[in-house]
Image (spheres, grey):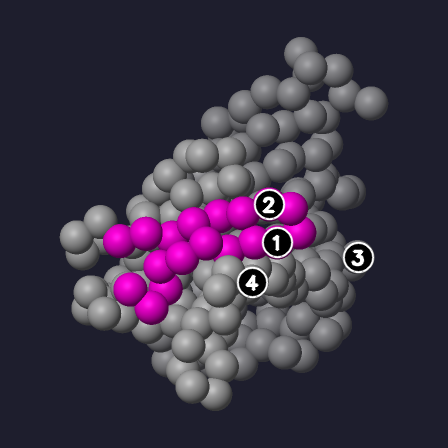
């Protein structure tokens, strides 16, 4: 096991692996399998955002030429412990969408090879729309989930959410019935209505996990 004092930056290796990553990003867009075979270890695997694991052969078979421009590396950080290097770099595409790459490189028989790749899309808040006072009024009320209660109120044109602990913050509308908290793009409040169009509650959705809150009559 590497000791803390053995884990340190390696500027020369950082330059070398950054150059390799630039080539790999270009190869990703041109479906250049030869470049990936040059830098990937035989046991290479890619871990995607959904938790799927793709090994080298399947990864190479899945490459297809893309019409967009390759990602551009904005920041690059490397730490090394013996024959292993951990790389973290932030990239942007032509639409300024941000991605975080986490990589494990290892020196095998004199060559530095990529063994593990994980890519995360850095989410941002969706565009907000302005609801009318009447639309906000339909959402206003007290909601409960078990013994806990939360409230939603209108402050002129703003929507204020009050948690069970008494703290308050503004939420914004993505659509009429979907609200989000600025700075928390993975979460949504999805409101439900009955056949008459009256709000009956909302689901606090965190990606694929839902918690139901019922509106008091």
Q: Secondary structure at mark 1?
A: strand
Q: CA distance from mark 4 to mark 2?
A: 11 Å
For the residues labelled 3 and 4, say whether their Cβ atoms are less than 8 Å apart. no
For the residues labelled 4 and 2, say whether their Cβ atoms are less than 8 Å apart. no
For the residues labelled 4 and 1, say whether their Cβ atoms are less than 8 Å apart. yes
Which residue is disc 3 drawn over? Answer: 43
Using a 10 Å C-alpha cutoff, classify the residue at mark 4 as few (fewer than 14 neighbours), some (14 to 19) or many (20 or more). Answer: some
Furthest toward the top, the residue is 5
Q: Nearer the viewer, residue 141 or 102?
A: 141
Q: CA distance from mark 2 to mark 1?
A: 5 Å
Q: Nearer the viewer, residue 35 or 96?
A: 96
Which residue is disc 2 drawn over? Answer: 148
Q: Is residue 66 left or right of residue 182?
A: right
What is the x, y in percent for residue 148? 60, 45
Tell me which label, 4 or 1, sits earlier in the chain: 1
Residue 154, visible in the rendered structure: yes
Which residue is disc 4 drawn over? Answer: 214
Using a 10 Å C-alpha cutoff, classify the residue at mark 2 as few (fewer than 14 neighbours), some (14 to 19) or many (20 or more). Answer: few
The magenta region covers: 137-154
Task: Answer whether residue 214 is magenta in the image.
Answer: no
For the residues labelled 2 and 1, say whether their Cβ atoms are less than 8 Å apart. yes
Q: CA distance from mark 3 to mark 4?
A: 50 Å
Q: CA distance from mark 3 to mark 2?
A: 49 Å
What is the x, y in percent for residue 60? 66, 73
Residue 20, visible in the rendered structure: no
Identified at 50% across, 71% down, the residue is 200
Which residue is disc 1 drawn over? Answer: 145
């Amino acid at each position: 096991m590497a000791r803390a004092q053995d884990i340190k930056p390696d500027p020369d290796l950082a330059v070398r692996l950054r150059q390799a990553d630039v080539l790999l990003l270009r190869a990703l867009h041109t479906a250049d399998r030869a470049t990936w075979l040059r830098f990937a270890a035989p046991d290479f695997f890619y871990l995607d955002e959904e938790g799927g694991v793709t090994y080298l052969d399947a990864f190479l078979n899945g490459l297809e030429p893309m019409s967009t421009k390759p990602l551009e590396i904005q920041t690059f950080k490397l730490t090394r412990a013996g024959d292993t290097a951990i790389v973290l770099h932030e990239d942007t595409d032509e639409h300024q969408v941000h991605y975080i790459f986490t990589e494990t490189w290892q020196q095998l028989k004199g060559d530095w090879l990529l063994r593990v790749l994980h890519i995360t899309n850095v989410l941002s808040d969706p565009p907000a729309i302005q609801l009318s006072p009447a639309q906000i009024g339909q959402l206003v009320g007290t909601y409960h989930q078990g013994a806990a209660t939360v409230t939603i109120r209108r402050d002129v044109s703003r929507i204020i959410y009050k948690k069970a602990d008494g703290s308050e913050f503004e939420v914004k509308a993505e659509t009429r019935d979907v609200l989000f908290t600025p700075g928390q793009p993975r979460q949504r409040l999805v409101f439900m209505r009955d056949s008459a169009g009256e709000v009956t509650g909302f689901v606090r959705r965190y990606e694929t996990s839902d918690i139901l809150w019922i509106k008091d009559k």
